[in-house]
Image (spheres, coloured by chain):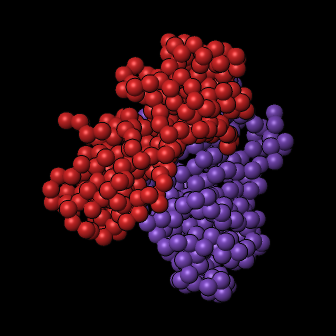
Chain colours: A purple, B red
Amino acid sequence: MRYKITVEYDGTPFCGWQRQDGVDTIQQRLEKALLPLSKIPVTIYGSGRTDTGVHALAQVAHFDLNNDIDCFRIQECMNAYLREVPICVLSVEKVNNEFDARFSAVERTYIYKILNRRARACIDANRVWRVVPLLDNEKMHNTAQILVGKHDFSSFRAAGCQSNSPVKTMNSISVTRNGELIIVEVKARSFLYHQVRNIVGSLVNVGSGKWSEEDFAKVFQAKDRTLAGMTAPACGLYFAGVKYDMEKFCL
Amino acid sequence: MRYKITVEYDGTPFCGWQRQDGVDTIQQRLEKALLPLSKIPVTIYGSGRTDTGVHALAQVAHFDLNNDIDCFRIQECMNAYLREVPICVLSVEKVNNEFDARFSAVERTYIYKILNRRARACIDANRVWRVVPLLDNEKMHNTAQILVGKHDFSSFRAAGCQSNSPVKTMNSISVTRNGELIIVEVKARSFLYHQVRNIVGSLVNVGSGKWSEEDFAKVFQAKDRTLAGMTAPACGLYFAGVKYDMEKFCL
């Protein structure tokens, strides 16, 4: 029996999603929380890895159990074992074996939170990137629209990216402000390594006036990572959701 | 020279605002952070005390210094000394000696955050009150309107309240929902001890269907604390701002 779970986590204390020896990761915490029910070790497959310090509002993962267990019981049991750590299971659903959290994904959404003020983040420490210069969020939004569509994103691709191609299709990107908080929301089927954080770093250069819209366009078109802005810090990034054609995966 | 400061804090690790021997409070942290500039102990007067675990988005306070120090320098210096704790100074202004953070206040705003879902708060741990039953926020909003105006709030007044009278004037109260998050915003010149948290506890009874609108009205009119709902936990409460007639206090 295959299960789809949706998970929220505060990435601050973890070395990212992926299981690794000797460090604390979200994947292994979830697998450990499943053990009292599964009795045998079960691998939990995420829809995408997140880096150290990156949060998730709705990470999706799947796993298989030999027995048919009530979804609500799985959720309550896992959450009981996760009580000590900032990870929680938001929902559990049964799906057919065609469902794969990673490969069935139609669209992923990331949001990036910038706290635009002088004083450091306090209530939102580790939840936002504090940027001091006043940012022109409308200019950032307008500039970002050049990224929508199918493009070579080499300029925003980190070294160590395992994607076969730097070409990705960005479905949408928006930059909105609510008081001191600026939210960048990005949607695409898949992303290159550090793509969102690199885009945000360069958009902040536009927002602060360091770069013009044309500078940003030139950097994007150059397909050269060394020209782009800094990689925005992990703590502002949230894996916000994954879309699937769920009617294909109903039992 | 009198200064007005606006302060943000995460109340979680503190025993509230007010200076007390042997425990960590926000007032004494601020006073300590001022010492390198003031050289002599200076009392910082808040616009209102907050309890253990209650947060502030914009607490206001005033203090006097013998010397005339640049406001920006005060802010930067205090924030440097506050780096280890979740308190930060958002702004510093010079005001005349008529200004009193507490007694000059025209209106105070509190917000209360409820996370309305099954799974416990994770990214927002210690920042919200998690309430499991689905709450009817519109019914809560409509019910709450009975509180607007000048009334005897004895039903929502905690034991130990030092106010001379249980009569207060509530300027406005609203209950709004944004996904799983429900925000209660309350505005009044001043509040009774635990008034907001007691109101929220009773409104949740209405939202969950445990009480009708009429039940709430009866409890309010009874002027009897023992009839009201639970005191909502401190972690969901934010002291959100104070209004002053600032033109009176300009130098």
Q: Is residue B3 visible?
A: yes
| Left or right relative to B202: residue B64 | left
User: Considering the image in quadrants, where does the C terminus of chain B appear?
Assistant: bottom left
Residue lying at 17% horizontally and 52% vertically, measured from the top left:
B41
Please say if A153 is above or below A237.
below
x and y percentages locating residue A46 in the rendered image: 62, 48
Of the pair A85 and B103, the residue shown nearer to us? B103
> In the image, is residue A198 above or below residue B133?
below
Q: Position of residue B99 (x, y in %)?
A: 37, 53
The residue nearer to you, when weighing A188 against B149, is B149
In which image quadrant can residue A200 be found? bottom right
Q: How many marks?
A: 0
Q: In the rendered image, which quarter is residue A251 located in?
A: top right
- Taking the spot 67% from the left edge, 71% from the top edge, the residue there is A138
Going by the picture, which residue comes out furthest to the left?
B40
| Quadrant holding the N terminus of chain B | bottom left
Q: Nearer the viewer, residue A20 or A40?
A: A20
| Position in image of residue B229 (x %, y %) | 55, 18
Tell me if I can see residue A126 in this picture: no
Q: Residue at x 43, y 42 (%)?
A: B55
Horizontal side of residue B88 vs B213, given as left or right = left
Task: Specify the quadrant of the image occupied by residue B70.
Answer: bottom left
Q: Residue at x 36, y 26 (%)?
A: B162
Q: Name the side, left or right, on which B43 lies relative to B225.
A: left
Q: Residue B24: image x %, image y %?
A: 26, 40
